[in-house]
Image: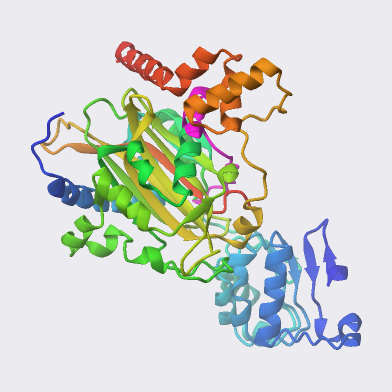
Amino acid sequence: MASTVDFRTLVDQSCRYSDEFVNIYYDCIDKRRRNLTRLYLDKATLVWNGNAVTGRDALSEFFESLPSKQATQGQTTLLVVTAGSVKFDGNKQRYFNQNFLLTAQASPNSDQPVWKIASDCFRFQDWAN
Amino acid sequence: MAKRFDGSQQALDLNNIRVDPDLVSQNIEVTLNRRNSMLAVIKIIEENIPELICLNLSNNRLYRLDDLADIVNKVPNLKILNLSHNELKTERELDKLKGLKLVELSLEGNPLSGHYKNQADYVSAVRERFPKLLKLDGHVLPPPIGFDLEVAPATLPPCKASYFCSEEIKNIILCFLQQYYSIYDSGDRQPLLDAYHDGAAFSLSIPFTLQNPTTIDLSSLGEYQKDCRNIRRMKDDPTTRFRLIKHTRLNVVAFLNELPKTQHDIASLIVDVNTYTATLLAFTVSGVFKETDGKSRDSFRAFSRVFIAVPAGNAGLCIVNDELFVRNATTEEIRRAFVAPAPTPSSSPVPTLSAPQQEMLAAFSLMSGMNLEWSQKCLQDNDWDFDRAAQIFTGLKVHQWFTRINEEFIYKT
């Protein structure tokens, strides 16, 4: 895939997209859990502390069960790495590391590509306790 | 204090603890209306019986609940609380315990009980703080009227260890990591150039707040701080944001060589495979390492590292993206680190080898450059067929695997 865009521009673009994505994702997971699966590709995979969940239906079920809180060839892909702390209802606060692979998909509604999560990997820092 | 704990009921009785004969005889003063005593008690509960359901604090001359407030976060399952015969003057004290999902509460014998003209107002005021309350001062209450929007609290799914997707990928990744980290820990990281793609990119980050309360080692992450790339803090500084990505493999490896020397606990590495497709293998490695030189010599760090790789010639995997997150290791992590002997990828006992096998092992190890342990694993997995094992190592299998996945993709879409 020949790219006419230079690396610096890609970096700047990536930063803008990642920033927006992180805001949307964590807002969604806190407040609008049911809409969360829309951010994922049909075939996306989530690896949650070693538990693998694939496909939108399974993802939907998985997110519902949490207490209340495919890159294809030639696709532009973005890696977002986050770290922070989370408190699920009825549990104590814990630190976590998470990373996402986002791919750009053409959208019928706009000329801007839509970013979808191709994979999501989440792990508590103290998962072994 | 163990005498006062009833495990079957998850109940702790601290009624009039100040005059407890055991404590008095040992000259231990537990005066719960003093901040230090209350905080100490909460800490003991948090560390030993955090699942506590029932707590009796009656007859302790409590006149305020500020010091008890932490119990909301630290003992989240508390449902029954006895605060009777204390000195609480107003119901506003209960605000400090908001968030506790109390089902039973006792307040009789406190000055605040006398404030209410009628029972209904009293119940109502208490229920404002504890909507799920069913019993107050020993009286069963009429069921609360309300909209039950709250879904029953679910439990989190259990946490598991590495997720590899398949045995094949597991072998590929473990093989790769063994080689990668043996170079990384060797003192000269220059040979890692072969592992990276020409256009590879690398960046580093550390925790937003360096105060992780469970660490004992407060040595700073100073060596890493200046290169920490947290884009949230660099919205107005695109130049730094750009500069902190190490781009092209020469820059990546040059930077890696500047980082403190390390020793990784290979046996304890956890791997999560994010994605694997025809063209991409992305996985996250977490684990612990020790710094072996520099200002922070002997400090233990924990890390989470994302590798994105593509298939490549003989080496098998070629890294295009590498993001490393470093933090101080927790006491638990340090305790568990470097305990296991040198890693063996298989869990089966090591069989004694015949003479021809030993010869083959030596030859294979020489050819591949892998240590005896990994060489043996590779040969064993391939029934001691040297050529087959060699094929795996040289990555031909990687190609076959990638090709197969590619075909699957074509047929499915």
B248 is higher (above) or lower (below) than B7: above
Indicate whether B83 appears above or below A53. below
Q: Is residue B366 magenta?
A: no
* Residue drawn where x is 91% and y is 83% of the image: B21
Q: Quadrant of residue B391?
A: top left
Is residue B199 visible to us here? yes
- The answer to whether A19 appears left or right of B90 in the picture is left
Quarter residue B353 falls in: top right
Residue range (magenta): B148-175
Query: Viewer-proximal residue, B150 or B170?
Result: B170
Give me the residue at 59% from left, 40% from top: B160
Which quarter of the figure is the N terminus of chain A placed in?
top left
Task: Point out residue A79 in the picture as x, y percentages from the top left corner.
Answer: 31, 43
Magenta residue check for B158: yes
Q: Position of residue B286 (x, y in %)?
A: 50, 47
The correct choice, above or below, for B379 with respect to A105 in the image is: above
- Where is residue B63, by image quadrant? bottom right
Q: Is residue B208 visible?
A: no
Please tell me how many numbered marks the rendered image carries: 0
Secondary structure character of the magenta stretch overall: loop
Q: Position of residue B273 (x, y in %)?
A: 45, 34
- Coloring basis for residues: rainbow
Image side of residue A106 versus residue B288, left or right = left
Q: Eyeballing the image, is B237 above or below B268? A: below
In the rendered image, residue A123, in percent from the top left (x then y), is placed at 49, 47
